[in-house]
Image: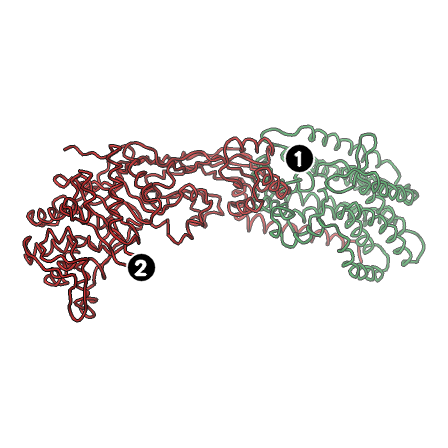
Chain colours: A red, B green
Amino acid sequence: MDATFIKRIYLTSFLIIAVVLFYYQILRGDYFEKRALNNYVRVVPISSIRGNIFDRNGVLLAQDSPSFNIAVVPYQIRWIKETLFEEIAKFLGYDKNLLDRNYKRNFRNFFTPVDIVINLDKKTAIELKEKFKNNILINVQPIRYYPYPYEISHIIGYVKEAENVFDDIKKYGYSPKERVGVLGVEQYYNRYIAGEDGGYLIEVNAKGEIVGFLGERKPKRGKDIVLTIDCKIQKIASELLSQQRGTIVLMDANTGEILALVSSPSFDLNSFVTSKNVSKFLNDKNKPILNRAIQATYPPGSTFKPIVALAALSENIIFPKTTFICKKIFSIGGYNFHCLSYHEDENLYEAMLHSCNIYFYNVGLKLGVDKIVKFAKKFMFDNITKVDLPYEKEGYLPHNIRYSKNWFVGDTLNLSIGQGMIEVTPLRLLVSINAISNGGYIVRPHILKAIAGKQESLSTNVYLGFSNDVLRILKKSLIGVIENKEGTAYLLSKLNLKIAGKTGTAQTKTKAHGWFVGFFPHNKPKYSICVLLEEVGSSFEAVKLSYYFLKELLDKNLLDITN
Amino acid sequence: MLKQFRSNIILKLCFYIFLLNIISMGTLYSSLHKGGECEYQLFYKQIIMIIVSWIILAFFSFINYRIYYRVAIFLYIITTILLIFVDFFGKTVMGAQRWLSFWGFSFQPSEFAKISAIFILAKFFSLPKKNDFLKIAITFILLGMNMILIFKQPDLGTATIILLLFLFVGFFSQIKKRYFILLIFALIAVTPFVWNILHEYQKKRLIVFLNPNLDPLGAGYTIIQSRIAIGSGKLFGKGFLSGTQNQFNFLPERHTDFIFTVIAEEWGFFGCLVLILLYWLILEKIINVALLLKDYFAFILTLGISVLIFLHIIINIGMTCGIFPVVGLPLLFISYGGSHLFVTYFLFGVFFNICRQHIL
């Protein structure tokens, strides 16, 4: 082979190199330029501080506190990752798998710090830093803290990192850790509370060390919000309910401001923030996360009777003095319908305080199903209350088709005592019955009082247009329930609060639910209360609970009653 | 006329090498530059080494190259002993035992192995005997022993270079080609066994070479980052001291084996072409001289020198671009380090002496 041939080999090789370089630098230059940019330009997110949440008296219900996280830069620790994790896990007494899991979940790219231990106290974090020096970073992040993690869970909700939402931008190094509110006002008013995350645009080297500063967007602190809730009342209600399944709602009868709303059993908000031990709440068959006041519907039972009475009075079908005879059994179409006892001759007042079923069977029959449903609709039984909480559920009433074809007279009888094809949420029932107290206005129940110091008025009224006479008669009948010795809620008269209201025993397949719904003082209503206890067998349990609840409020001077 | 050609060629080569020195210093300055400050110590050290190299070059250009014909075997034995020494007393740097320390100086005997390999090839191929098979067998066994020792250090790059040097020089010498073809087949046949004795990290490098994304933080990292650096240089580069991959430390070993990426990033395609052109001009001049030589020993010597330079350049640039596996070879004239500079300048000294002796 000629030695000149070697020249050709050299030249060809150099040309190949030139072609390769041409390909990388000219043809794919833009692509690699972008990759180089991604290498060294980083967005370091700074979480915004969420607004605090206060009760109506300024008691802190939710705040951001600093959480000390331990982070590592993947590239920097790439050779020592396993041993480093092992040592950190050993130091903290954690399982190494937890660190691996966090690492995997929070990993974005090789140069962005990854949180591997979350929410340490300051002392431990500093000890770790002293031990592992530059291999780890302390990453201070705000974390939501709830001073009353159980008592007010359903109203407040919690905060978590919305990683999944931002999965698509994760690879670009942007903050996937934006915190969003889940449930309660944290969710409903998230856009006010959340503020805006900020960030630094920085240049970093291969160790993730900052070598240049390109820009900054300051995070915006979220707005503080004030709730209508009175934390002290809320706590009392929560304690009373703690052993039972049910709900207590106390509302301002005129404005719809909710002073207390407790659903029991409850869940620990702080566990949900740190994602620790949440499965026990999620898997509990008693459904602690369910807000029974607005997300569960129950048959109203006898508490529906005032609506039926109001319909009959308005339609002039009965008058206060109209009587029906109760012989404990009411037979129709070959079926027997029962009352609790022999009430003999009963007018409206007597029927109401005894909660006589047969009286209302008669009224219901005279009214007809259409009228009952019409009035129930007027009272918005099948609508949401528009309370400012997420995922409110609406109740239901017999639907047109349902009662035209397969509707029997027995169904009408059931409906007239609030059973069968009728279910409402406790808050819905409270607001509807409350309309009797305030002269026929459906208020909008709400929880928000102020945003960033500015009063928010969410009070809206829907006037139902009932005559004052009818309302007065009805109110009188409801006063009898408490004040008459034979009244089903006579116990409450001991409180001297001038309570008017109605008990209810909602029949279910298992044990009956107990209701009490009422308002006080009846001459100038100020408060409206609703108590529901699941599967307690009788309404008396609800009356008892109402009694203890209001008594404690009285003893602690928490009610604003000046008359 | 010939005299003019000779001095002309020496002057031209000196000029090209000087240009490479300037490029080297500029690039080194940039790659040692960190946060607005250069690591001056290394930079100055390299300048001193370049000056020493020039002295070596000048010195050996006055030593009659025929002497190497006589000392080739002696040099080979010394090198082999040094290589065995490294096995026992060598300094371990980055997991490889390549260095020997004498009086505070460290050097790599494997660099000497390249020189002795060229001498051995030149000597045996230019022996007056006609037995080609014996020539090939002896040189292959001699070089093979060194290769195995170097391979054990482990320095896959130098071992490969010596093997390729043997094949290239053999092919372009007047030895019968069929023996080489046989040898190549034999080498291919033993490849699987070689694979088994490769170190874990070497296997990894070869696998990752085929797909760098397999291990983007480990073995593939260098290739990925160097590709990004080269590609992002585009036509005219990001400018002196402005390479982000370089300045922000994304490139490991960028003042040694991966220095080409710094040139590519900061001076772009254009800068790369200038560098390649310089290399080509140097190699072309060497081959031009080789073609004129009548002394067969000098011819093989010159051929060996050009092949050695060529292989270093191609393999180094090729590996930074990701078309060859990463084997740890310096970019001649440009990379930081003394050993390869001394060897290269020494070889140029030898070559200049050949020019002086023959082209008169």
Quadrant of the image occupied by residue B56: top right
* Element assignment for label 1: helix
- Judge left or right: residue A383 versus residue B162: left
Amino acid type indicated by mark 1:
Leu
Could you tell me which quadrant the C terminus of chain B lies in? Answer: top right
Q: Disc 1 versus disc 2: distance between alpha carbons?
A: 86 Å
* Residue appearing at x 81%, y 45% in the figure: B114
Closer to the camera in the image, B360 or A94: A94
- Position of A146 relative to A420 (above/below): above
What is the chain identity of the residue bearing mark 1? B
Q: Position of residue A137 (x, y in %)?
A: 55, 35
Q: Position of residue A69 (x, y in %)?
A: 51, 37
Query: Which label is found at residue A561?
Result: none
Q: Does residue A515 appear anywhere in the picture? A: yes
- Judge left or right: residue A111 versus residue A180: right
* Element assignment for label 2: loop
Disc 2 target residue: A510
Dot 2 alpha-carbon crowd within 10 angstroms: few under 14, some 14 to 19, many 20 or more: few
Amino acid type indicated by mark 2:
Thr
- Judge left or right: residue B344 versus residue A206: right
Dot 1 alpha-carbon crowd within 10 angstroms: few under 14, some 14 to 19, many 20 or more: many
- Position of B138 relative to B242 (above/below): below
Quadrant of the image occupied by residue A144: top left
View extreme (right): residue: B129
Q: Position of residue B196 (x, y in %)?
A: 76, 55
Q: Does residue B267 appear anywhere in the picture? A: no
Label 1 and label 2 in one chain: no
Q: Nearer the viewer, mark 1 or mark 2?
A: 2
- Position of A150 relative to A416 (above/below): above
- Position of A100 relative to A358 (above/below): above
Query: Which label is found at residue B28?
Result: 1
